[in-house]
Amino acid sequence: MEANSVSIWPRMEPFLLGALQVAPTTKLSLHYLRKMAVYVQTREGCFPVLGWSMWRHIACGKLQLPEDLAWLYFETFDLLLGHTPEERLGRAECLSQCSSKSELDQERNKLSVDTLQFLLFLYIQQLNRVSLRTSLIGEEWPSHRTRSPSPSERETKANSQNKNWDDQAHLSFVQSHLTDILELLVEPGQLSQSGQVQRGCQWNDHTTKDLNDF
């Protein structure tokens, strides 16, 4: 392997279980996630670990996301981590027993996630983004000349549209967006004024580990 080459093997779990099967909010576009990346790396208490209270502040105060949606992203990412079934059950029971919002917030505040990995998780929500062309044109209008698809063809089409299960779609997504992904991981001082990665920038060991573990 050449000294400057990099090999990446995307894990299936974040795409299969983590990417919500709905069109993502525009607040999770690269433009806003770049701003979030700079914010969390320059604010105390946000990096390298991000707690629920700080994520709620960013999501609801900065990105204008509903709190329920902010928690959905946070909890979904936490489910991808290596918790034991006993830990998951105990946490679920504690949350279900909360009788007030203050108790619920107190319990949620016990959760924290790796900041850069969570940024990557938010970015891969773009996997199910609907293109403008598809939303405007849609599928071809059926006519009497159009042959009805067979059950096997309908199943193949349904599977191809579900990108969460398509490992080739995962690979294509990473290959097509690798530059954007790396921009979210570099330190703020290594970005140009336009937000692009400067030539010759380097990633520290923590960033490399986050990319490998995700």
Image (cartoon, rainbow, N blue to C red):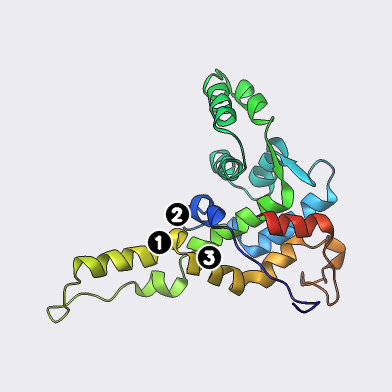
Specify whether 88 is left or right of 156.
right
Task: Write the residue at 62% across / 21% down.
Answer: 103
Nearest to viewer (mark 3 / mark 2): 3
- For disc 3, the marked residue is 170
Q: CA distance from mark 3 to mark 2?
A: 14 Å
Task: Write the residue at 66% across / 40% down.
Answer: 56
Residue 105 rendering spot, x and y as whole percentages? 64, 27
Q: CA distance from mark 1 to mark 2?
A: 8 Å
Query: Mark 2: which amino acid?
Result: Gln
User: Dot 3 lies on which element?
Assistant: helix
Task: Tell me which label, 3 or 1, sits earlier in the chain.
Answer: 1
Residue 73 in which image quadrant: top right
Height in image: 180 above or below 39?
Answer: below
Residue 49 rendering spot, x and y as whole percentages? 76, 43
- For disc 1, the marked residue is 162
Position of the N terminus, as image quadrant, is bottom right
Residue sitting at the far bottom: 145
Residue 143 in which image quadrant: bottom left
- For disc 2, the marked residue is 21
Task: Write the residue at 20% across / 65% down.
Answer: 151
Task: Tell me which label, 3 or 2, sits earlier in the chain.
Answer: 2
Answer yes or no: do the residues labelled 1 and 2 have beta carbons within 8 Å? yes
Query: Mark 1: which amino acid?
Result: Asn
